[in-house]
Image (cartoon, coloured by chain):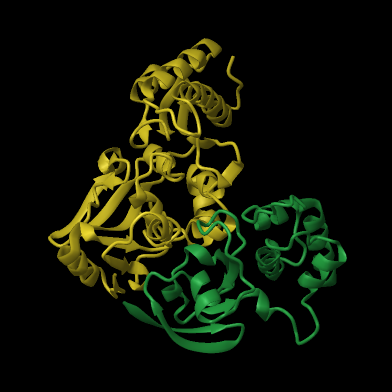
Amino acid sequence: MFVPINTTINGKIYSVSAEAETSLLEFLRDVLELKGTKLCCNTGECGACTVIHNGKPINSCVTMAADANGAQITTVEGLADGDKLHPVQQAFIDTGAVQCGYCTPGFIMSVKALLDRTKKPTAADIEEAVSGNICRCTGYNKIVDAIHLAASKL
Amino acid sequence: MEYFEPKSIGDALSVLAKHGAEAKVIAGGTDVMVDIKFKEEPSALVNIKKISGLSGISESGGAIRIGALTTIREIETSSLIREKLPVLWEASHQFASLQVRNTATLGGNICRASPSGETLTPLLVLNATAICAFSDGERSEPFSSFFQGPGKSAVGAKGLLKEIEIPIPAAGSKGVYLKHAVRGAMDIAMVGVAVLLAANGSGVQEARIGLGAVAPTPVRAPKTEALLKGKPLTAALLKEAGTLSGSEASPISDQRSSAENRRWIVEALTRRGLAQTWKAATGKEVA
């Protein structure tokens, strides 16, 4: 059964139908062809699919696409301003926080949401913000460096 | 798969009455979406998030009411919960990741009826009541009889959980939720223990102990609670209470832990929880 979905993604309005069981992740990647958000565990454990839904970071793989109805969603494609990367994206590059890169979009969305909540995150704030994101290359120290750098630039 | 977005409890109950056990209620989706992908797709999905009045935290008449659609993050960030029900706050703080807490609902965690559900042992020791809607009216079900087995609760296939009512514990009582897991909050608890303790001049006035992930449902440890009543918490009594609490658990062996190891952890966490709450309530170490 198809469900109509009217939603705003990265400031653009979409009106598309999708099968009721479609996850928000499948909707973004397979229906709208927005491939920046990554599919990894598909069970809400790893955070690679993190997007910002009405201001809050969520796992899009375990969210119904139908719950995007009427919502404001930001994905990693919505951060850069033209050719100018968002400070969080630039900080990940500048500190070498990207290894294989697969977890990076999810981390960046969690960090963007963190810095939207607080401009001066404590160590505990940072741990809370990204403990739902797993980096299989285990490059966590540089990711924390990137968060501090991004916070100082915002 | 049929899909429904009822706008009222009455509409939701009508859909459930028609589709019964073939229908699956979905709220946050953090468990149900995984089931749909990896286990079985239900013939009907009933998304209850559009029903108004099922979300929010309020206090009245010495009790706190939490709507079934309230997210775990809303509980974690509520100053009312942190002040009046710290044991529930602790469980919500140790609940998976921020992403999951932003979408998972209290009602979902309860209706999932997993023995390891993070909020369940705290609600059990808080003597919470589940208020459920059925086609023939509302019923209040105390948590002591709400859970019937893994995935089975008094809500059944045709009811809907509306809200949880939690009497505010007496001033001076102290609570703690201790979770044992290999990978912190993200991990499913190997064992979870909630303790709520009130003390008076002669010793333990009342101790309530809830055990998670060590029986088909979250359970209380009534023999241990009775043992402690009226006695000062000495080191000898603490040891005896731990051992007795372990004997009240009926754990299984699985990939997370052996049954024997789980029983030891119940003993250790019971001792730790009692010692912590005793100190918080009396200002004294266990002697």
In green, which chain?
A: A
Q: Residue at x 74, y 81 (%)?
A: A80
Can you give x and y, in whole percent of width and height, for residue B190 in the image? Answer: 50, 34
Q: Quadrant of the C terminus of chain B?
A: top right
Can you give x and y, in whole percent of width and height, for residue B14 in the image? Answer: 18, 69
Q: Quadrant of the N terminus of chain B?
A: bottom left
Q: For this view, does B277 lie left or right of residue B254?
A: right
Q: Is residue B46 positioned above or below B110 on the image?
A: below
Q: Nearer the viewer, residue B40 or A126?
A: B40
Q: Colour of chain B?
A: yellow
Which picture quadrant has residue B205? top left
Q: Nearer the viewer, residue B188 or B231?
A: B188
Q: Nearer the viewer, residue B24 or B74?
A: B24
Which picture quadrant has residue B6? bottom left
Q: Residue at x 41, y 45 (%)?
A: B168
Q: Residue at x 45, y 86 (%)?
A: A16
